[in-house]
Image: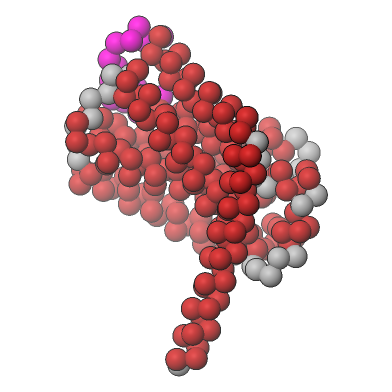
Amino acid sequence: MQNSKNIWLFAISLFWQAALRIAEKDLRTEFRRSYEVLSILTFSVGSILICSFAWSGGSVGPEVSAAALWTILFFASILAFTTSFTREADRGTLGGLKTLPCSPLAILAGKIIYGTVLLFFVECVLIPFSIIFLNLELGGRFPALLLVCLLGAVGLSFAGSFVSGLVMFSEGKTLLLSFLLIPVCMPVLMPSVSATREIIAGSGISEVVPELRLLTAFLLMITAIMILTFEFVLEE
């Protein structure tokens, strides 16, 4: 029993080491070519500024602010995940990934970590701009909003990385990714918008537990789908 446990722990350790190395490689590539990150940040901040000007700098309802914030984050995620697996396919480096001594799920996990870090970085820039230009009064609820945004970023990363892997061999993959992400990300966007609206309206983290449970349920569901299918997706 002890030997079996040690083998499992060793396998899990190798899995996460491979995933972290792949995520580190992608993040180094992304920030080395900083114009891609800057384009995502420019789009996100510019969209918030346009919303502020459109609303004449006045306060709007929590539902409008929450919907605007997550709409911008969704389109920022499209910009981020168009370079996830498609960059590997276009550059011919996908074969190198397949030869790594790790499972296909470790490759996917690395892409998910990369996407989560990138989206959370965008959120850390976008949320302060939203507070300033959309006149959000959070008070001591900023950590709750950050937690919701982090879980939403994880959900978008799961969905975006998986869909990016599905379309990486397709012609017109960028357009196809955009269309497929809309229905796949709905189980993430709807509870995220609802939880963000409640927090902006004055609720604490305890009031948005049902929405957080929905996000967790989606993560468990898509994880099960990826475990069953992604090995075939990577081979095809």
In the picture provided, is 201 more to the left or to the right than 217?
left
Q: Nearer the viewer, residue 145 or 223?
A: 145
Residue 38 on image: x %, y %: 56, 28
Q: Which residue sits at x=28%, y=48%?
A: 210
In the picture provided, is 86 more to the left or to the right than 181?
right
Q: Specify the quadrant that holds the N terminus.
A: bottom left
Query: Residue 162, can we see it?
Result: no
Q: Which residue sits at x=68%, y=32%?
A: 175
Question: Looking at this rendering, what residue extends furthest in the front direction?
Answer: 32
Q: Residue 200 falls in which quadrant of the image?
A: top left
Residue 216 on image: x %, y %: 38, 53
Question: Which span is picked out in magenta?
Answer: 54-68
Query: Residue 81, can we see it?
Result: yes
Q: Nearer the viewer, residue 234 or 190?
A: 234
Q: Which residue sits at x=36%, y=10%?
A: 55
Total of numbered circles in the picture? 0
- In the displayed structure, 119 sits above or below 125; it is below
Coloring basis for residues = secondary structure
Residue 82 on image: x %, y %: 65, 38
Q: Residue 18 falls in which quadrant of the image?
A: bottom right
Question: Looking at this rendering, what residue extends furthest in the top direction?
Answer: 56
Taking the magenta stretch, the answer to whether it contains residue 61 is yes
Residue 198 on image: x %, y %: 25, 34
- In the displayed structure, 24 sits above or below 72; it is below
Q: Specify the quadrant that holds the C terminus.
A: bottom right
Q: Which residue sits at x=56%, y=66%?
A: 17
Taking the magenta stretch, the answer to whether it contains residue 159 is no
In the picture provided, is 218 more to the left or to the right than 184?
left
